[in-house]
Amino acid sequence: MALNLAVSNIFAFNNISTTAQVVAQVNPARGAILFHNPGTVDIVVGPSTVNVAGASANLALTTGALGGGFRIYANGGTLTLTGNVAGAWQALSVSASGNPLTVMDLQ
């Protein structure tokens, strides 16, 4: 059986910078999400929306406002989240640009 990478659930990024960018689109079938940082700079990931005082609000991650994010340490740090993870996810690096990040959708 041939592997069809056009429908792979692994996403490779090599351009994570200090400006947040979407690294996982909304996926209603997602039951868990795995983030892996093979690079030399810590990366912070977070959902695009969070709960603020009982209401949904957009999360604007910046290097100066990391609340709502999860730090993934450099040199092999991995984070797996389960549960309410079907929404979009964003990532930024704590410094520099051109940083790698691997994201895997789990059903």
Image: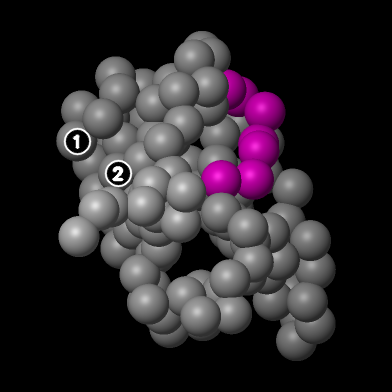
Residue sitting at the far front: 1
Q: Residue 62: percent from the left, percent from the top? A: 67, 36
**Colour convention of the picture:** one colour
In the image, residue 80 above or below residue 20: below
As helix, strand or loop, the secondary structure at mark 2 comes to strand
In the image, residue 47 above or below residue 4: below
Q: Is residue 7 visible?
A: yes
Amino acid type assigned to the residue bearing label 2 in the image: His
Task: Point out the image quarter for the N terminus.
Answer: bottom left
Q: Which residue is mark 1?
A: 76
- Tell me which label, 1 or 2, sits earlier in the chain: 2
Residues in magenta?
17-23
Q: Residues within 10 Å of mark 1 (few under 14, many from 20)?
A: few
Q: Which residue is mark 2?
A: 36
As helix, strand or loop, the secondary structure at mark 1 comes to loop
Write down the quadrant of residue 59 in the picture. Answer: bottom right
Q: Nearer the viewer, residue 86 or 54?
A: 86
* Whether label 1 touches label 2, CB < 8 Å: yes
Amino acid type assigned to the residue bearing label 1 in the image: Gly
The residue at the point 80 percent across, 68 percent down is: 57
- Does residue 103 appear left or right of residue 86 in this picture? left
The residue at the point 40 percent across, 57 percent down is: 9
- Does residue 86 appear left or right of residue 50 in this picture? left
Task: Point out the image quarter for the C terminus.
Answer: bottom left
Write down the quadrant of residue 46 in the picture. Answer: bottom right
Q: Nearer the viewer, residue 57 or 27?
A: 27
